[in-house]
Image (cartoon, grey):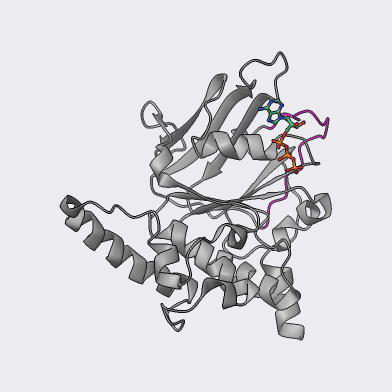
Amino acid sequence: MAVSTFSSPTPVFGIAEPPASFSSTAIGWKQPLRFRRTKKPRVISCDYSCIEVRDVCYRPPGTQLNILNGVNFSLREKSFGLIFGKSGSGKTTLLQLLAGLNKPTSGSICIQGYGDDGQPKADPDLLPTEKVGIVFQFPERFFVADNVLDEITFGWPRQKGSLQLKEQLTSNLQRAFNWVGLDSIPLDKDPQLLSGGYKRRLALAIQLVQTPDLLILDEPLAGLDWKARADVAKLLKHLKKELTLLVVSHDLRYGNRVSSFSTQIAVQNFVI
Ligand SMILES: Nc1ncnc2c1ncn2[C@@H]1O[C@H](COP(=O)(O)OP(=O)(O)OP(=O)(O)O)[C@@H](O)[C@H]1O
């Protein structure tokens, strides 16, 4: 498995050496690092932070074999990263660690702040798992409600005392609907009657209400037709302006085209 990161707002296909701070270790599958940069990074003279996975190993409890061995990568805020690797190489395991569903056996997952000189500003903080959103594969299969509003508010607190939190969530909901372009959809519509692309938008909105800093998407385009793929890819490109995106794919060809994840599909949309 390999991890690529991109910080360019407009991806253009290209290959470059990884920055010094970036390294990757093949996991299970001995694949050398593939790093594709889209453009020369802009030199931004201000502080910034990176989500950093440092020497992470994971061995499931009760087993003798590490699924992940010394994984390292750094993903700058508001950038787009891709985890790709063969089936069984450990992608899902890694995203479960990032989302806090499991803990690394060793190593750490943290946020490191840097000054404009590129030097770490202070000790890193552990990545707060409540700031990580995750959209699993085929999220629409897990829809439980019979209307859009109930679907999106399904996990909200039900207790009386949490009015302030609900107000905050409602305001976030409005923003999330605008972000993903769901504002024209009636809230009483059955989610199962939405098109494939709109179902994915709804799954994204559910996560965006919680205002994550990092949004992980497992195969976000899987099972969609070309139009819905173009639609969702365009949306992801838009979302990258607001938060950090990490996309997981088992399709190596998809990985090879990662830098055109947004642009190729946008071109396809343009041509058609
Ligand atoms: N709890 C566990 N105990 C033992 N082995 C496990 C456990 N969880 C996962 N594995 C094994 O670890 C390996 C990596 O699994 P993982 O699901 O992370 O791979 P993946 O890259 O996401 O695969 P895919 O692309 O097929 O979804 C697999 O061989 C899997 O069988």
Main secondary structure type of the part rendered in magenta: loop
Q: Quadrant of residue 42?
A: bottom right
Pick the residue in front: 13 or 119.
Answer: 13
| Rendering coords of residue 222 (x, y %) | 72, 61
Question: Residue 92, how many percent across, how many down?
Answer: 66, 40
Tell me where the magenta segment starts and ends, as one range.
Answer: 24-38
- Where residue 259 sits, quadrant-wise, is bottom right
Q: Nearer the viewer, residue 70 or 18?
A: 70
Q: Residue at x 62, y 60 (%)?
A: 141
Query: Is 251 covered by the magenta stretch?
Result: no
Question: Is residue 196 or residue 85 the one in the foreground?
Answer: 196
Q: Is residue 167 above or below residue 6?
A: below
- Residue 257 vs residue 174: left or right? right
Q: Which quadrant would the N terminus be assigned to in this image?
A: top right
Task: Tell me if residue 205 can be seen.
Answer: yes
Instruction: Report the number of discs.
Output: 0
The answer to whether residue 194 shows anywhere in this view is: no
